[in-house]
Amino acid sequence: MITETVLIIAAYLLGSISSAIIVCRLMGLPDPRTLGSNNPGATNVLRIGGKKAAAITLFGDGLKGFIPVFIALKLGVSPLVLGLTGLAAFLGHLYPLFFGFKGGKGVATVLGVQFGFSWMIGAAVAGIWLFVAFGLKISSLAALVAMTLAPLVVWFFWPDPALVAIQSIITIILFWRHRTNIRDLLSGKEGKLSDSE
């Protein structure tokens, strides 16, 4: 129990490190919480700082999800603990201890978690995101479609009830975090990726 508890707490703390804010500070860019969508995530960093800053942010956010889950997997924990470790990293990104509990929306971190579960799960979900993103040029819609299908992807590659249930919880939370985007999508006001170039 001690190992499992430490894993979950460490995952939350790692998730609490905001890649977007750190990258913007190091590159002399404005705080992503004050411009664009005011969201400390890779898409908003793309808007205010360009592709290089966004790519570094995306990679950093993905690592936050991947590292704790990969370690948990190598330690041979149960699927339940593995899923809770991923959930903790995700919640750390959304509600970071080090940044006033005001974080991003968690898409890149969830993808990192999914790659930690299995490269096949991560690749399948990332493939769905890329297909929608390149086709419709709307990052939020791509994320919503990919995460809607993510529980099915997890079930297909690793049909453990606990893991599928936790992915479903993550999907529900992610939809809640994207509620403003959903309203904008329904009203036709959501920005496109091409608007960031």
Image (cartoon, helix red, strand yellow):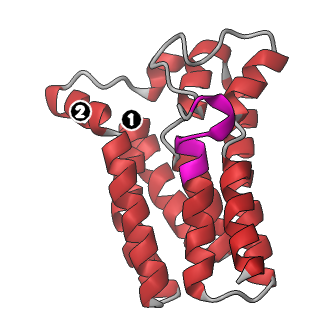
Residue 68 position by quadrant? bottom right
The amino acid marked with disc number 1 is Ile
Q: What stretch is highlighted in magenta?
A: 91-100
Q: Nearer the viewer, mark 1 or mark 2?
A: 2
Q: Is residue 63 left or right of 44 when viewed as pictured?
A: right
> Is residue 121 placed above or below 130 in the rendered structure?
below
Tag shown at residue 138? 1
- CA separation in Å, label 1 and label 2: 9 Å
In the picture of the structure, the residue carrying the numbered disc 2 is 185
Measuring 55% from the left and 56% from the top, which residue is drawn there? 110
Residue 167 position by quadrant? bottom left
Measuring 48% from the left and 40% from the top, which residue is drawn there? 105
The amino acid marked with disc number 2 is Leu
> Marks 1 and 2: CB-CB under 8 Å?
yes
Measuring 80% from the left and 84% from the top, which residue is drawn there? 75
Q: How far across and down, in percent of the image, does residue 171 sit?
A: 38, 59
Q: What element carries label 1?
A: loop
